[in-house]
Amino acid sequence: MEKNNKYTCAEYREEMMLLGLKKRLNDKDISEAERWTITREIEKLEIDMDIN
């Protein structure tokens, strides 16, 4: 994927979503099912953002 020099609103939104999910994942009060779901969402976002 070729990166352009412009930082778009969509990229910012993806980054904020990723940060929020990672923060939520560190919460001790979430169930294993929710932890699994959050982990899958993080993986999907990282693939979409090409930051594996």
Image (cartoon, rainbow, N blue to C red):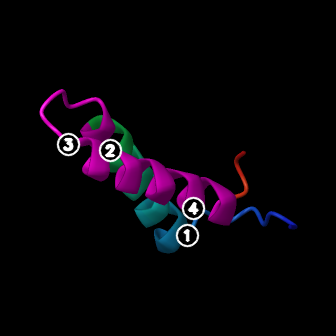
Q: Earlier in the sequence, mark 1 or mark 3?
A: 1
Residue 28, how many percent across, how many down? Answer: 18, 27
**Magenta span:** 24-49
Comparing 2 with 28, the one in front is 28
Q: Specify the amino acid type for callout 1.
A: Thr
Marks 2 & 3, CB-CB < 8 Å contact: yes
Identify the main secondary structure in magenta. Answer: helix
User: What secondary structure is found at the residue carrying circle 3?
Assistant: loop
Q: Is residue 26 above or below residue 14?
A: above
Q: Gap between marks 1 and 2, in whole Å?
A: 29 Å
Comparing 11 with 36, the one in front is 36
Residue 21, how many percent across, how many down? Answer: 34, 48
Give the label on residue 31, or none. Answer: 3
- For the point 80% across and 63% down, the residue is 3
Front label number (1 vs 4): 4
Q: Specify the amino acid type for callout 4.
A: Lys
Residue 40, how many percent across, how many down? Answer: 49, 56
Q: Earlier in the sequence, mark 1 or mark 4?
A: 1
**Residue of label 1:** 8
Give the label on residue 35, or none. Answer: 2
Q: Earlier in the sequence, mark 2 or mark 4?
A: 2
Q: Residues within 10 Å of mark 3 (few under 14, many from 20)?
A: few
**Residue of label 4:** 44
